[in-house]
Amino acid sequence: MKIYNDEAKVSWTIWLYKDVGLQRTVYASPDSPWMKLVAPFPEKKKELQLDIWGKLPSEEADAVMKHLAALVDKVSPSVERKYPAYWGTIRHLDRVVLHTLLADSLQMELRSFSGGRGWRS
């Protein structure tokens, strides 16, 4: 509890109920009809860093986000103390820009791979 409360400044209850004993790794087989259908999209998601878990390095995305974070830190230094403070500016920007705004704007592109098929197919 001391680590959560004193060092990380995050409530232990968030993690206790969210992750302990519940979070698992599940993925579709690369040979499945679904993965064959959407094959180009996971690569695009990796390149743009749209997933917070398992985020892979991307020179282009990293450069843009570092530049944006430097600007935000310059004009609004209080961002560094925004909850959760241990995230830092880049992680806050990742959440807003990549994982919310950009990911949301690309959902129809993912849907377009279905070629008009319904969810049952």
Image: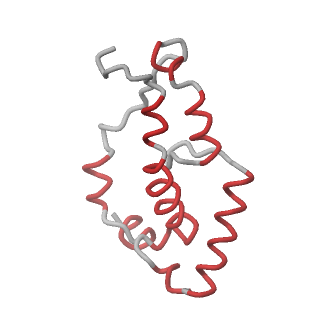
Residue 3 falls in image quadrant = bottom left
Does 46 sit above or below residue 3? Answer: above
Where does the image place residue 101, in percent across and percent down from the top left? 46, 57
Q: Is 40 or 88 nearer to us in this picture?
A: 40
Q: Is 22 or 52 nearer to us in this picture?
A: 52
Residue 19 falls in image quadrant = top left
Residue 93 horizontal side relative to residue 23, left or right: right
Residue 82 falls in image quadrant = bottom left
At x 46%, y 21%, the residue is 28
Q: How is the image coloured?
A: secondary structure
Residue occupying the far front of the picture = 116
Marks counted in the figure total 0
At x 42%, y 27%, the residue is 26
At x 51%, y 61%, the residue is 97
Where does the image place residue 24, in percent across and percent down from the top left? 38, 33
Residue 9 horizontal side relative to residue 113, left or right: left
Does 96 sit above or below residue 79? Answer: above
Where does the image place residue 40, in percent across and percent down from the top left? 60, 29
**Quadrant of image for the N terminus:** bottom left
Does 21 sit above or below residue 99? Answer: above
Where does the image place residue 71, in percent across and percent down from the top left? 64, 79
**Quadrant of image for the C terminus:** top left
Does 23 sit above or below residue 6? Answer: above
